[in-house]
Image (cartoon, helix red, strand yellow):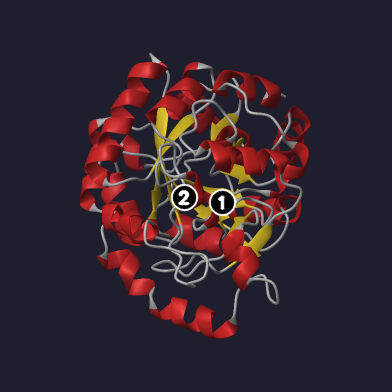
Amino acid sequence: MCAAMRPLTAGELATQLRLQTPVVQAGMGGGVAGGALAGAVSRAGGLGTVGIMAPPVFAAALALARRLAGDRPVAANLLVPFVREAHVRACADERAALVVLHGGLGRRWIARLRERGLHVLVTVGTQREAEQALAAGASGVVAQGDEAGGHLLGVEPIERALPRILAAAGDAPVLAAGGVAHAHDVARLLAQGAAAVVAGTRFLLTEESAANDEYKRRVASARSTIATDLFGVGWPLRHRVIANAATERWCERDPHGPAPLRAALRLSAPLGRLTPLRAMSGLAALQRPALPLFTPAVPLAGMPEASVDRCALYAGETVTRLGDVLSAASALEQLAP
């Protein structure tokens, strides 16, 4: 077995990533975490992550991130239902220091990425999922708590999930995601045994984030979140969001959405595997709050302000402790333990 295929230890991962601050910026997909954000975070001493986009755009964003990062490493995040071979090629061509798979085990993609000599972490919410990921060849795992924003695999708070996942991982590295807003959150999770932490909402609220400005304003002023199944066309997974016109219309009685709608969304799962990301994003332009057909697409800079009421406004429970938009470097500095 070549060195690239040998499982990593937490210490080896830290050495290879050369993190000055043990913080990984979450790879918020769909365009939010592009090259500008990832490059800025890596250049400042954390690990910036480019989120999945249509393959040509994704490859260009990785290349930009690497240029902006200087000699610092850059990571990539791939959402399992939407991965294509072109994403794997882009990760290899741009020498991603780490690839995180999210939203499923993705055995095929673990194998393809490892064949390319890339280190692969899989996001998990339970001890059993961690065991499955490592058995499938993952280099380590990201333990997600249910307070995290976006696409939810976590089923309990990170402080309860992390010890069990650490026990399942043995010497393999475990990153902790969920509830990371300030330096003391980072210090607490590192003290529990995490090799590093993953922060999403804090980096959503940065100048380099490509989220729509109105989306940022609403997240910065939000005081609660909702775990819902509403934004599941093509990907029937729970998502943590802040409220907008769509959730107010369809989640008043049940935050997860109407039961018949959830059943229909489960039947839509093949769309995620068959529909290109570019086409999925195009469907978002047709969404209306009054019609309960919502993809996981996010409102990006340049989209009409009205898009924030018909797209998912992903955010974690840290919204209650965050309220400002900073530069990526300043956000990382606030997280330094």
Which quarter of the figure is the N terminus placed in?
top left
Bin the neighbour count of mark 2 within 10 Å (Cα to Cα): few under 14, some 14-19, many 20 and up.
Answer: many
All told, the count of numbered labels is 2
Place residue 77 in its image quadrant: top left
Q: Could you say where residue 296 lies in the image, as x and y percent from the top left?
A: 45, 59
Place residue 16 in its image quadrant: top left
Q: Are marks 2 and 1 in contact (CB under 8 Å)?
A: yes
Residue at 47 percent of width and 21 percent of height: 40
Q: Nearer the viewer, residue 141 or 21?
A: 21
Residue at 62 percent of width and 48 percent of height: 315
- Residue type beneath disc 2: Val
Disc 2 designates what residue? 298
Residue with the most extreme top position: 70
Q: Could you say where residue 214 lies in the image, as x and y percent from the top left?
A: 56, 40
Residue at 40 percent of width and 41 percent of height: 31
Residue at 69 percent of width and 23 percent of height: 334
Q: Is residue 138 left or right of residue 126?
A: left
Q: Could you say where residue 262 lies in the image, as x and y percent from the top left?
A: 52, 78
249 in relation to 114, above or below: below
Q: Is residue 337 left or right of residue 296?
A: right
3 in relation to 249, above or below: above
Which quarter of the figure is the C terminus placed in?
top right
Bin the neighbour count of mark 1 within 10 Å (Cα to Cα): few under 14, some 14-19, many 20 and up.
Answer: many
Disc 1 designates what residue? 313
- Residue type beneath disc 1: Leu
239 in relation to 138, above or below: below
